Image: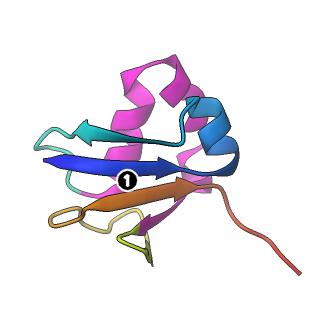
Amino acid sequence: MALNIAYFAWVRERMGISDEVVEIPENVGNIGALVAWLAARDERGALAFAEPHRIRAAVDGVMMGADAPLADAREVALFPPVTGG
């Protein structure tokens, strides 16, 4: 399945790109598995996703947890926790 992945903040900096289209393997069925797969692909991914519990995700613009399925997703945005005030 082809999936557009957008990276934000320090995730983008560590990945070295702002977005990419990837063909994800069939066994990557949810956000947690996607983050693990991205971390295992290369050194940039390993650095960006070294602490997967810190990564937040939005699937097609909706915030989701690590167990959220990717079944019909078009885009996944990955970013660190956001704070504000």
The percent coordinates of residue 29 (x first, y second) are: 20, 54
The percent coordinates of residue 6 (x first, y second) are: 46, 51
Using the rendered view, name the quadrant where residue 18 is placed.
top right
**Residue 50 in sight here:** no
What residue sits 58% from the left and 35% below the top? 48
Q: 23 left or right of 36? A: left
Q: Which residues are magenta?
A: 30-58
Q: Pointer 1: residues within 10 angstroms few (<14), some, or many (20+)?
A: some
Q: 49 left or right of 83? A: left
The percent coordinates of residue 50 (x first, y second) are: 58, 35
In the depicted structure, whether residue 37 falls above or below residue 52: above
In the depicted structure, whether residue 60 falls above or below residue 30: below
Using the rendered view, name the quadrant where residue 31 is placed.
bottom left
Q: Nearer the viewer, residue 19 or 69?
A: 19
Q: Secondary structure at mark 1?
A: helix
What residue sits 33% from the left and 60% below the top? 75
**Residue 18 in sight here:** yes
Q: 36 left or right of 3? A: right
Using the rendered view, name the quadrant where residue 20 is placed.
top left
Q: 34 left or right of 85? A: left
Query: What amino acid is labelled 1 in the image?
Result: Gly
Q: Residue 39 lies in magenta, yes or no?
A: yes
In the depicted structure, whether residue 20 falls above or below residue 78: above
What residue sits 18% from the left and 46% below the top? 2
